[in-house]
Structures are given as C-alpha cells and as structure tokens.
Image: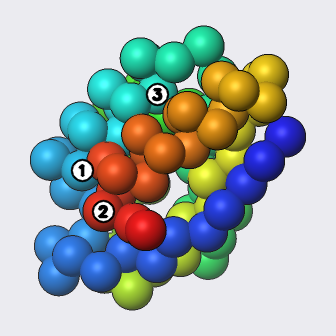
Amino acid sequence: MRSFTYRIQDPQGLHARPVTALAAAALGSEVSVHVTRVSTGVTADARDLLQLMGLSAPCDEELLVELEGSDDAVSAAELAIRAALGAS
C-alpha cells in the first residue's frame, strides 16, 4: 500500500470537477483507491462520485489518498490521481 496527502487549494473545496477527474483516474486503473478527509476520518472509495462528494472537503482540508495494488499499477495510478487533483 502507498499513500500520500494532499491539501485542497481550490477556494471551492473538493467540488464536482476535481471529483469527476479523480473518479475517472481511479476507474481507469486496477488499483484500489480510497480518499480520507483527515479532519473527520470519513473515507470514500475514489471510484464512487457520490462518496467523494460526500466528503464535503473545503479549501485547505487535508486528504489522505491510499492506493493498493501491484507496484507498477500503483505508480501509474498515483501519477494519474495527483494530476487529477492538481498535485505535484
């Protein structure tokens, strides 16, 4: 398992556009991806738009992204998810 944190920088928080990009990146991989809103501990399956929207994460919230799968698949999925979130 690999994980990384991401602090939301968009003034609108985690809204429809980044959620859609994140879900598309997760759906396009064979990796299991979960996103946790650190302040509340609520976790969402990154392939589920409604669960991701349900995080209701505002600007400056920290997210924990956890990826599980083969090393090569995790590496590719991490790059896609970081791009979807606008993270480096």
Q: Which of 82 and 62 is in front in this view?
A: 82
Q: Position of residue 73 (x, y in %)?
A: 65, 24
Which one is earlier in the sequence, the residue at label 3 or at label 2? 3
Amino acid type of the residue tagged 2 in the rendering: Gly
- Disc marking residue 36: none
| Residue for badge 1 | 18
Amino acid type of the residue tagged 3 in the rendering: Ala
Q: Is residue 70 visible?
A: yes
Q: Nearer the viewer, residue 52 or 4?
A: 4
**Element assignment for label 2:** loop
Q: Position of residue 5 (x, y in %)?
A: 61, 68
Indicate whether 44 appears above or below 4: above
Side of 46 where 69 appears, left or right: right
Amino acid type of the residue tagged 1 in the rendering: Pro
Q: Nearer the viewer, residue 61 or 33?
A: 33
Residue displayed at 26% across by 70% down? 13
| Residue for badge 2 | 86
Indicate whether 65 appears above or below 81: below
Residue displayed at 66% across by 62% down? 4
| Residue for badge 3 | 26
Which one is earlier in the sequence, the residue at label 2 or at label 1? 1
**Element assignment for label 1:** helix
Indicate whether 86 appears above or below 26: below
Separation of marks 2 and 1 at Cα, in angstroms: 8 Å
